[in-house]
Image (cartoon, rainbow, N blue to C red):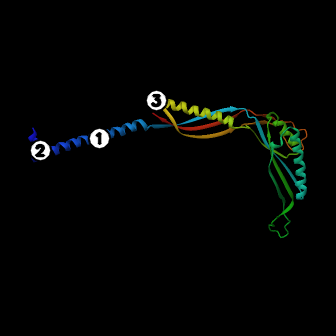
Amino acid sequence: MNTFFEGKLGDYTRKGLLAAVVMIALSYGVSSVESIVNLSHADYTHGSITITGHGEVLSVPDIATFTYSVVADKPTVADAQAEASQTANTIASYLKAAAVADADVQTTDYSVSPQYDYVQPPCTTGTYCQGKQVLKGYEVRQSTKVKVRDTAKAGELLAGVGTKGATEVSGLSFTFDDPSIAQGQAREKAVTDAKVKAEKLAQSLGAHLGSVTSFDENLAGSNTNPVPMYAKAVGAGMSDAVAPQIAAGQNTVDDDVTITYEIR
């Protein structure tokens, strides 16, 4: 047996056996590495699903807002400003007496602009004669936004500013002093809706929900639908104006979220 490994033949035999052992060892080594890689991939690399959820809440608005304008037309800027200021101050005093806080009254625009008449002169030549603009005076316009915290008084105040000289009253809307409350409720509903959908989908796929990997939100805001029913038009000089019946109703606050979940 010993002579089998002796001499040149023995050297070749020993080298051949050593090479075979090395090849076998390398073969097992590569196989083990591949197994480890496959196992790692199975344990730590997961799929994901993306779901959209919708949330909607109805809530009674707690504030109303509207805008009124004072307009004065006079031959001079000074006269127009004086008249507009007098009317604006009268309305401001009325609002203050109606318990509207100074902080809830905001001037949003003030402008002075020239006003013209277009004059067409008589034609003596029998052909077209071009007219011209002639300055007739100046217009002063002051616009103010009012926040009404007692929404039941919105109609009364709309009529009131008209009786005190406001020439334009518009933009009535109902909203929330702190919109984050209703927005948070809508968001919670949207997230819950998305999670329920995701759980059902994962179950149908034979998987389980993992952690959230991304979140996106599209807050639609508040949809207001006030329904004013005017018993009489509001306008300057109408001292007997009847307060319009205003229905605050409810506002709809929507929220949509898109959530990506890891699944296992």
Number of the label disc, if any, that sits on residue 10: 2
Compared across the picture, whether 152 is left or right of 202 comes to: right
**x and y, in percent, of residue 194 in the image:** 55, 33
Instruction: Say which of 225 and 183 sits in front.
Output: 183
Three-letter residue code for mark 1: Gly
Three-letter residue code for mark 3: Ser
Instruction: Kindly state the secondary structure of the residue where label 2 is placed.
Output: helix
Residue at screen point 43% across, 37% down: 44
Q: Could you tell me how many numbered marks the image carries?
A: 3
Q: Neighbour class for label 2 at 10 Å: few (<14), some, many (≥20)?
A: some
Number of the label disc, if any, that sits on residue 204: 3
Compared across the picture, whether 193 is left or right of 17 comes to: right
Residue at screen point 90% across, 52% down: 83
**Mark 1 or mark 3: which is in front?**
1
Number of the label disc, if any, that sits on residue 89: none
The answer to whether the residues at label 1 and label 2 have Cβ atoms under 8 Å apart is: no
Instruction: Say which of 238 and 117 sits in front.
Output: 238
The answer to whether the residues at label 2 and label 3 have Cβ atoms under 8 Å apart is: no
Residue 149, can we see it?
yes
The residue that disc 1 covers is 29
